[in-house]
Amino acid sequence: MGDQMLKGFKDFLMRGNVVDLAVAVVIGAAFALVVKSLLDGLINPLIAAIFGKPDLTGVGNFTINGANFSIGLVLTAVINFVIIAAAIYFIVVVPMNHLAERRKRGEEPEPEAPSEEVILLTEIRDLLSRTSGAPTQE
């Protein structure tokens, strides 16, 4: 029973979609680090220069009946989302769509021509089959 469960679990993990999902999570984490460094290194200092605040979280804060509201916090999340979505779109989606269009039009690269060794071996096979009277294999 235990061996079957482990085999089933291994089969589940080795399916293409699970491996693809794991790769997507790792790439997503890498994109998050890139976006964070982009925000910390470029956008937040720009906001600080414009609004006199260290980052967007300090912009548009107000309190009503003891409840704190932060428009800047929401804007930071929106900017993060837009940057990540743009990066994924232009780095992954556009090239994949272009590749899919090329395949639809039949512009796939042509298969390589057989090497000289393969051509020579094919000729030898054909010559041997003619002299022995056996049919050729194509």
Image (tube, helix red, strand yellow):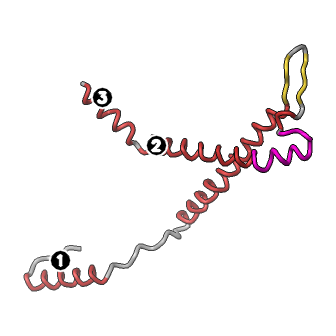
The image shows residue 63 at horizontal and vertical percentages of 90, 21
Q: Position of residue 25 (x, y in %)?
A: 55, 41
Type of amino acid at the residue the image marks with label 2: Asn
- Sequence-wise, the earlier of marks 3 and 2 is 3
Neighbour class for label 1 at 10 Å: few (<14), some, many (≥20)?
few
Q: In 3D space, how far apart are the residues under numbered discs 3 and 1 (Cα atoms)?
A: 49 Å
Furthest-left residue in this view = 132
User: What type is the residue that disc 1 sits on?
Assistant: Thr
* Secondary structure mostly seen in the magenta stretch: helix
**Residue appearing at x 55%, y 67% in the figure:** 105
Q: Is residue 125 magenta?
A: no
Q: Which residue is mark 1?
A: 136
Q: Secondary structure at mark 1?
A: loop
Seen from the viewer's position, the closer of residues 80 and 20 is 80
The reply to whether callout 3 and callout 1 are in contact (CB within 8 Å) is no
On screen, residue 121 versus residue 46, left or right, reads left
Region of the chain picked out in magenta, as a range: 40-54
Whole-percent x, y for residue 94 in the image: 64, 57
Mark 3 vs 2: CB contact within 8 A:
no
Residue at disc 3, secondary structure:
helix
Q: Is residue 13 above or below residue 105?
A: above
Of 110 and 11, the residue lying toward us: 11
Q: Measure the C-alpha gap from mark 1 to mark 2.
A: 43 Å
- 73 lies above or below 36: above
Q: Which residue is mark 3?
A: 5
Q: Nearer the viewer, mark 3 or mark 2?
A: 3
Crowding around mark 3 (Cα neighbors within 10 Å: few <14, some 14 to 19, many 20+) is few
Q: Which SS class for mark 2?
A: helix
